[in-house]
Amino acid sequence: MNINYNPYSKEFWKDPWTIYKQLRDNDPVHCMEDFGGAWALSRFEDIWNAHLGSYKDYTSRFGTSPPPLLLGEDSGPGHVSIPTNDGQDHRDYRNTIAERYTQPSIAQMEKDIRKLTQEELKPALKTGKLDIHEVARRVSLFTIADMIGIDREVALKARHFIDIFYERDPNIVGATPKGQEAFGQCMGLMLEMAETWRKDVPPSPSHINTWVNKRVREDTFMTNEQIAGNTSMLIITGSDTVPFNTANLFFYLNQHPQQLEMIKKDFSLIPNAFEECVRFDHPTNILGRKLVKDLELHGKKMKKGDAVIYLYQSAGRDEREFKDPD
C-alpha cells in the first residue's frame, strides 16, 4: 500500500485517523521522502521503546519539533532549552527546577490555581458564554508565568508573538515570514528580560531566581540564551497542551452525555477522564529526534543522522496496546 503521510497537508488533516491506522497496519516505519528521508513511527510500542532507549539511539540536540527536523528551520535561542539536551546534560538542567513539579509542590499551588480559575470564569457568569480553551489557556499561562517569575503581562506579550508564529498560510509549508519574525521578537523579548533579571532577580522560589543563582553543575551557570530559551519553552508548553486537552475533554464529554453525567456525580473521575482524553486525542501530535547510529526496525534500515518523528496521536489509538481504542 502506498501511503502518503504529510503532516503539513490539508488532505491529511481531513481524516488523520484513517492514515494513522494505515501506517500502523502497513508501514509502521514510514519513510517521508518529501522531507529528506525522515522517518515516522506510528505504533505505540515502537514509540515507547524509542523513548526508553532515547539517548543511546537518538539525540535531541538538533531540535525535537517538526520545523527543525522536517524543514531544517532554525529554532533560535529556543534551541538551547532543556528538551534539546541529552543524557546527563538533560538531567542536570532539568533538575534545576524539577522539585517545583513534584506532586507535593503542585498540591501547594491548588488554592491559588482555583482562585485564578474562578476569576477567569467571572465574565462567563455575566454573558452566559464560555470559551473553554481561552479560560484554560489564561489559567495555565498565568500559572506558569508565576512559577517562572515573570509578569503576567510579559507572558501575554510573549504568547501573542507565539500565536502569530503558529498562524499558517495554506500556500506555505511551515512558518510564514510574519510568523518567523514574531518568533524572533519573542526570543528577543526573552533575551532582553534575561539581561534584566541578572540585575534584578525575581524572588525565590521562581525559576528565574534558580537559573540565575544555582549552578547547573560545578562551575556551570545558565547563560542568558539558555534562560531565554527555557522561559519561552515553558510559556509555549505551559499554555498549549493544557488548554488544548481541557477543550478536547469538554468537546468529547459533550458528545458522550452519559459519561458527563457520571463525572458530575463523582468528581474523582476527572483525573482519569483527563488522561483518557490525552490518549484519545493527544494535544502534542508530533515530536522527534535524530539518530546517532544506524538502526533497523521492522525491516527498515534507518541511518545515523536521519530524523525520526513520533506520532503520538497514532500511538494512542494503537489496537496492539489498547482494547477498543476508538
Image (spheres, rainbow, N blue to C red):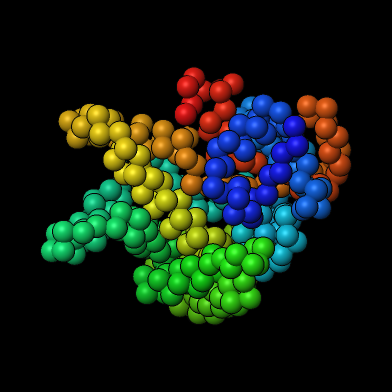
| 209 w.r.t. 308: above or below | below
User: Is residue 300 in view?
Assistant: yes
x and y, in percent, of residue 176 in the image: 62, 71
Identify the residue at image location x=59%, y=54%.
10
- Of 241 and 95, nearer the camera is 241
Identify the residue at image location x=55%, y=37%.
17
x and y, in percent, of residue 167 in the image: 53, 67
Report the side of 248 relative to 297 (left or right).
left
Identify the residue at image location x=51%, y=71%.
164
| 70 w.r.t. 178: above or below | above
Report the side of 48 relative to 161 (left or right).
right
- Of 222 and 138, nearer the camera is 138
Q: Quadrant of residue 81?
A: bottom right
x and y, in percent, of residue 203 in the image: 39, 67
x and y, in percent, of residue 66 in the image: 66, 54
Identify the residue at image location x=59%, y=21%.
320
User: Is residue 183 in view?
Assistant: no
| 58 w.r.t. 174: above or below | above
In the rendered view of the protein, which quadrant contains the N terminus? top right
Q: Quadrant of residue 257?
A: top left
- Of 314 and 294, nearer the camera is 314
